[in-house]
Amino acid sequence: MIEIIRDTKIDFMGYRKFAFIFSAILSVLGIAALVQISTGKANLGVDFAGGTAVQIKFHSTVPLNEIRAALEKGGLKDFDLQDLPTENKILIRVKKQEEKIGGYAETITQVMNQSFKDKGPVIDSVTEIGPKVGSRLRSDALMAIVVSVICLLIYVGWRFQFRFGVGATVATFHDVLAVLGIFYILDKEINLILLSALLTVAGYSLTDTVIIFDRIRENMKKMIRETMTEVVNKSLNEVLSRTIVTTLTTLLAALALFFFGGEVLHDFSLAIIVGLIIGTYSSMFIASPVVLMMGSKTTIMKKK
Amino acid sequence: MKKGIIWRLGLIVITVLISIVFFLPNTPLFKYMPEFWQKTMPNRGLVLGLDLQGGLHIVFEVEGDKAVDIAIERIAATLRGILEKKKLTATVKSEGPHITVTPNSPEVRKEIEREYPILTPTEGQGFVRYTLTAKEAQRIKDTSTDQVLEIIRNRIDQFGVAEPTIHRQGENEIVVQLPGVKDPKRAVDIIGKTALLEFKIVDDESPLAAELPQVIMPGEEQQLLQRLAQRLSEDQEILFQRVVNKETGVVTKRPYLMKKEALLTGDLLDEARVSIDQRFNEPFVSLTFNPAGAKIFEEITGRNVKKRLAIILDGNVYSAPVIQEKISGGNAQITGNFTLEESKDLAIVLRAGSLPAPVKTLQNVTVGPSLGRDSIEAGTRAGIVASILVVVFMVVYYKLSGVIADFALVLNILLLLGAMASLNATLTLPGIAGIILAIGMAVDSNVLMFERMREELRAGKTSRAAVEGGYKKAFWTIFDSHVTTLITAAVLFQFGTGPIKGFAVTLSLGVAINLFTALIGTKTVFDILHLKWDIKRLSI
């Protein structure tokens, strides 16, 4: 049989200090991103911030500065331009909080049709979100994250022990924060699609954590004489190859999505890829040490 | 044992057949099926979301407060009539949600409160102010949302969109989804227009009328209104007509001094049609009132001969012809520089009736058909690449057992598509992403079991015992990990909107089906192999 690794004896728990420092940095980044999001300074998509986004496709390239000039001449202020280099597409965003929406999309369409008639502009999509909907989507998103984490904590706490629940929750929060932080650093747009990627990552990372916890629980019953550190290390080594294989298969699918899935899913799949890697790392280096540190082996045995 | 295998094999075959039947309408094959099949078998399949087939998703908010204001205005007008009839002198003024009556006399109050028990009075310095009771105001808001919904539905029916979705959301919001609509801007205009048609008399006799400028530039309206606000009496108002110079194309505004009271409104219309003016070859909308409306029209034209009758739509004057004589028959027309399309749309909204309260667009998402097409293509491509990568990886890594896992993968995708088609679920772009990720995750359960089997084999167990042991030990791990994913999917479904909901549906169906294919599908194949051959070495 082909095996990626076999009979490893890695001292996972020995590396936990480095892991904690690395993860602390990622989490701080994520918290910084959250603060920026809540104050509206981050690169929020129009679905969260409210405003207008128009995506236009041309049949040949149009330089961004020409578009900017044309739009400014058309009386538009405070807009963002972004080009999607793959297919002569540009995205124009106007983030303005206005009671009533409408108007901007029309202006943009008119300007494009007049100024770049020879380039054959086609309106791919128009998104107009009023401030009321934007803030509702934001609070719904927050609710989604909080509710799902609470439900997961309850489930894992019930199926395992309380400290496993804590370990899983810490790791899951860590993953979401890390992906958010990385996206913030990369100046990627924070939008609804990213949110669904984050929740998928949370679910997947938890699956991974549960698989490891399952083995720790099993070994705890078998290895009565060994210390908890030994139990955790042995369990992690035992499941290492399947952790790598399951992550790899999902990663293959996510990579296919990243390279071939088209521009709309580009950032979504990037978030999944980053999240998969971080989720796998955190199950081993965050979730498991937390369980270990939350009690010695004897106290667990007494509890049982 | 053997019986168990047959039962499970039967289950797999049946679910596969059912899935194929449900998913068939989404494939080109469906067209070649015999007629009885197309008629009796499921024929809808998966529905493409707006983001994939292009179309319009709008959320409107019904401004219920305005509906209350309108109701108050109407009550005030009726009260004036009642008090006049009873020879009681009092000024009745409506302002937003209030009616102010001066002076505060007991007879007047008695009369008003007898006529309208739904009004609650508050006494002030020499006046009394009425507002609607909270219950009545709420009732008006509530019914106005329902009415708006009904009228919007009517307008869309007449506009002609295949499979529109129109529903109420929360207290005062209306969600409209129009898949595949070609001219989204026009659709938004038709749906969102209040289309309040009013007939009012131009007040040329007032001394103020002579002071009004003939023409002002667009944008100067507010200035003019502010300047004259103090001098308008409470039953007068100034409205504007948009005038386009046909040669130069210059737009100007023409102010009119009006009697505020609407003598006739669009509710009494029977029919609105587009006609073409023979002389100027210009389209206009001809109106026919119902008998009640026709009677009122005859009466007002009879009473106001030689005066000008203004035709007003949503507060804009369209024309104000002089009434030459009493007009019976109940026919009128709206003219004013329309294109043929504009006049058609106007006829549609007038036929469907005016909205009882204006609506505000909260959210408008339009996706062009080309973007959707591109997304489907890219999604399909990514799906095929992902499948090939995963399938090849499994065979290389797990050999023949990998082939069995790949069989489970194909089963998984087939059942997932079938299940979604049977629910007529909406496939969105994130949904496609969900399917592709499901491809990657589909084999995960098998990986868990195979790794367990390898451990069992290393421990020296026979092939058959290793399979049994692997399944048994991996079961709870698989179960727990799937439940956690289901929880996330459920939360996404609860809090997500549109495309995200689609993603949640795919994800949860994918997880449930994965449990089936992993625990029943591959296990059955292993059992059959063990039953047929005496396997000494498991190819894993």
Image (cartoon, rainbow, N blue to C red):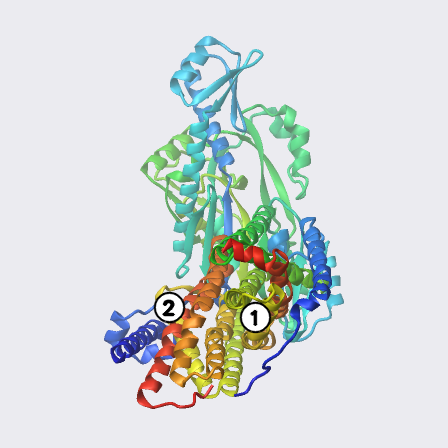
Q: Secondary structure at mark 2?
A: helix
Q: Nearer the viewer, residue A257 or B451?
A: B451
Instruction: Give the x, y percent position of residue B344.
Output: 45, 54
Instruction: State the mark number for residue B419.
Output: 2
Q: Which residue is mark 1?
A: A235
The quarter of the picture where residue A120 lies is bottom right
Q: Residue at x 57, y 70 (%)?
A: A235
List the single residue furthest toward the front: A225
Q: Amino acid at mark 2?
A: Ala
Task: Say whether mark 1 and mark 2 are on the same chain.
Answer: no
Q: Quadrant of the N terminus of chain B?
A: bottom left
Q: Nearer the viewer, residue B387 or B133?
A: B387
Q: Secondary structure at mark 1?
A: helix
Instruction: Give the x, y percent position of residue B279.
Output: 48, 54
| Residue B310 can be seen, yes or no | yes
Instruction: From the viewer's perspective, tell me whether residue A227 is left or right of residue B47.
Output: right
Q: Residue at x 64, y 58 (%)?
A: A293
